[in-house]
Image (cartoon, rainbow, N blue to C red):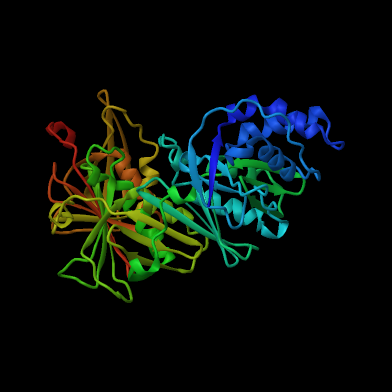
Amino acid sequence: MATEHIFTPSQTRRNAKAIAQALADHDNVNHDQAERIATDMASKYVWSVRRDAYHAEIVAAFSARYQVATQPVKPTTPKRQPGPVVVVEPAPADDYTIASGGVVIAQVEHHDITQSAPSSDGAVHVQQADLKAALTRVMRVMSRRISWGLLQNVCLDVAKGKVRIYTTDLETMAVETIDAQTPAAPVRMLIDGRRLLTFVRDLNAGAVSIRVSTRIVVSSGDTSMTFEAGNPDEFPVVPAGADMTSITALHSDVVRDMAAAVVMAAARDESRPALACVNLQQPKAQPGLLRAAAADGFRMAIWEHTPDTITAQFDRAMVRAGALKILAQNMARPGHQVEILETASALIFKHHTGMIVAQKVDGNYPDVKQIAPATTTAAVTIDADALMAALKPLPAKLNDDRVHIMQLENGIVKLTVSIDGERTEATVNASRVNDKARLPLLAMNQTYLMDTLAYFKGRDIEISGNGRNVAVLVQENRPDAHVQHVIMPMVIADKKEEQ
């Protein structure tokens, strides 16, 4: 190890003219070029040099980096600025280390303070289309509301012909893996995610090279951009295989259906954190069943599925609804398996190009089976598309977004919207009715009903209830899943509304 003296950019910049003059003493460097080099280097790096020859060392560093094939001439040393003494390990493979705060410190050992710049063989080569697609998927996790600069980055783990790209908002982590030509030694990089994606989007199709030294240079053909290199050791890590327990594997279409069925019912605000989540569980009374549920206090969605195999049992886990939404978006290719794994702090959904790591949220979740009506006295079966077509033309009032549903004679269902005393009606035929009891007058939020019908598009649904001012149950039984949507009622106080 070598004892070093650190000079800040401002200190080095004050000496730039003297450094430039020292460089210009050599025939192949003019003074203007030398001063520009010195000033440029001083603005980018904090140089660390030996106390007994700091000026000559910096000159040597500039000469080596800019390939000035000369022996520096040591001028009269200007007055030195005081600075701290630090001890650093010489970098084995490059000419810098990253200190706290992202400061780049050049290594100084005698008069050889830089090693050779990374060769082209040390670069990472990927296809533009693959890099763009992977960045697009992981960036879905990044929120513009996050003010912590570290979480505006993506981390690149490069090893053995693969590049693993990931980022996190500390609640959800998105990981994507792409093929690449990689150097022999593993490399980790931390880079501004939005700037990188914006740059890669504008590139033409073809190979993209990524080189890391004191900065990260991304290039394709004649186009290149330089990025600040962050410290990847400060970034959250991807869970390791030894920490994960496999629970089950589901077909990707089943996972998409689960997300589509329940995410819509989760709360949008964070005032009650549990209601902004999806609750996944294996009921103790039905150990072979996987249940997902979400509720925002006004509606609830329950999705149940029996997997072919369950390799490990787990009680329950609450994860952010947004994590399942991103999972459904990131599964680009249909027809593959999604493995669900568990760690002490997260659920992991591993798909064909990567994974979503959803942190568990602490708290208690409502007993959804106590909220959903166990039995109903009256029900009608109706085509969801026909009901949607009848509902769409009906107007909605912002402060009273309700629709009334009432079963008439001969299996006809009437939809009514009343705005400022004016009623607008539409009717649709039910395919099956309960002969013993007629569906009572129901009132529910029109937007919630539209969301439910959009999920059940193209299928027959059963609408049932036990009376007015009681929760409305919309459900469907399929061979692969049982789905229930419960919509809380809007109070019907006026008997005239039944007419």
Q: Position of residue 116 (x, y in %)?
A: 70, 53
Seen from the viewer's position, the closer of residues 139 and 380 is 139
Residue 109 located left or right of residue 329? right
Total count of labels: 0
Seen from the viewer's position, the closer of residues 290 and 403 is 290
| Residue 137 in sight in this render | yes
Residue 198 located left or right of residue 473? right
Residue 12 located left or right of residue 314? right
| Residue 499 in sight in this render | no
Which residue sits at x=35%, y=59%?
258
Seen from the viewer's position, the closer of residues 242 and 183 is 183
Residue 18 higher or lower than 58, as above or below: above
Q: Position of residue 282 (x, y in %)?
A: 22, 66
Within the image, what quadrant is residue 358 found in?
bottom left
Q: Position of residue 270 (x, y in %)?
A: 27, 38
Which residue sits at x=59%, y=31%?
9
Q: Residue reaching furthest right?
A: 27
What quarter of the picture does the C terminus occupy? top left
Residue 345 located left or right of residue 60? left
Residue 39 higher or lower than 177, as above or below: above
Which residue sits at x=15%, y=52%?
371
Q: Position of residue 420 (x, y in %)?
A: 26, 23
Which residue sits at x=23%, y=40%?
444
